[in-house]
Image: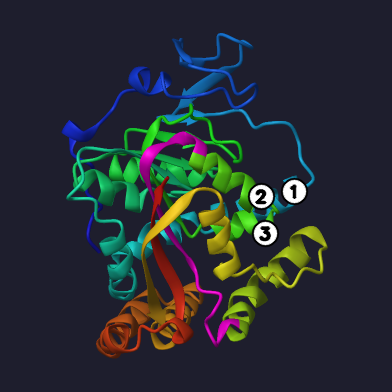
Amino acid sequence: MATPQAVPAQTMLGWAELAARLRCSRCQAGPLEAAEGGLRCPSCGSEHPIADGVLVMAPPAASPTDGVVQQELEDWERNAEFYLREPRSPLFGLLHAGKRRAYALGGEPRLLVLDLGGGTGYFSRELVRQGHVAATLDFSARMLRLGRKAYGLPLAIECAVPPLPFADASLDAVVANGVLHHCKAQDALAATVAEIHRVLRPGGLLLVYDRNGAFLGRHLHHFVLGVKRSLERRRRFGASSSGAEPDFNDADVRTLTDAGFAIERRRYVSTLWTFSAIVATNCVEYAGLPRLAQALRWLAWPLAAVTERVLAFKAVTVEQCLRLRRT
């Protein structure tokens, strides 16, 4: 298995420079200032430490969705190592070829990009390779620290949103990679989209990769993804949740346009065959057979490559990519 490559040093940005663009996660005042061991809010005095290279932003006041957020967090942290390995599998590379094209900002000048819900920072690394500066924000400290160790990402921020800990019009682009449907599950989609609009400069880019609510097989999709999570949550929390998560449908896309974003491009990726192959091989790996899983991924790859090229239509694809611009 290939070793992850660190990001180029010339695309790094220091905390002192970023502090001028940050806001306090407690009182939303800014800018922050350098302090011993981290950053400090001069308005309310809150300390935001930098631990193992990760800026820890204190959570805002408790909300009714905190239980949902905690369940999500435990799910992600339990599978953090898998998400670090997954990008190096052949099916992942094929599945996310469309995503990488959507995220290609090579024609843009050097941008400051927020990778929202960036996890281990795989796509932050892709953006940095294109010559941009990427700040990776996630609510999982474990995933951020694994990404720091694997990729050497210079800017990692542990923070739950909304709100976003950035000043108005302080960012050139935001990447929301499989994030917005989670915000919808927490009844925070509109608030999160409004925050993204606020922190982007006029003309800034929003790149969204999320579920396709028009997928004809979405109920099977929900069932496959939901069973394991439902059993885990019942055992851990005594909850009777189905484990299903919302789609990201046309009404949610209208939430983006109503907030002041104009769609520049929309494409559909991940056919049912590709998705099924990924789920099946992941289950084999979960069963403790990683070598067999890797062999099956290579066997499934040729047909997946064909279906992604000729069958990537709205009704038969699991996910969608959108490129939007802030108006």
How packed is label 2: few (under 14 Cα within 10 Å), some, or many (20 or more)?
some
Question: How many numbered discs sit on the rendered protein?
Answer: 3
Q: Is residue 110 left or right of residue 103?
A: left
Q: What residue is pinned by disc 2?
A: 188
Quarter of the figure with the C terminus: top left
93 magenta-colored:
no
Task: Give me the disc on residue 24.
Answer: none
Q: How many residues crowd around disc 3 within 10 Å: few (fewer than 14), some, or many (20 or more)?
A: some
Q: Amino acid at mark 2?
A: Ala
- Dot label at residue 65: 1
How crowded is the residue under tag 1: few (<14 C-alpha within 10 Å), some, or many (20+)? few
Residue to which mark 3 is pinned: 185
Q: Are marks 2 and 1 in contact (CB under 8 Å)?
A: yes
Q: Tell me the element at label 2.
A: loop
Q: How is the image coloured?
A: rainbow
Earlier in the chain: of badge 1 and badge 3, it is: 1
Kindly identify the amino acid type of the residue bearing the numbered disc 3: Ala
Nearest to N terminus: mark 2 or mark 1: 1
Specify the segment rendered in magenta. 198-218
Q: Where on the picture, by quarter, is residue 34?
A: top left
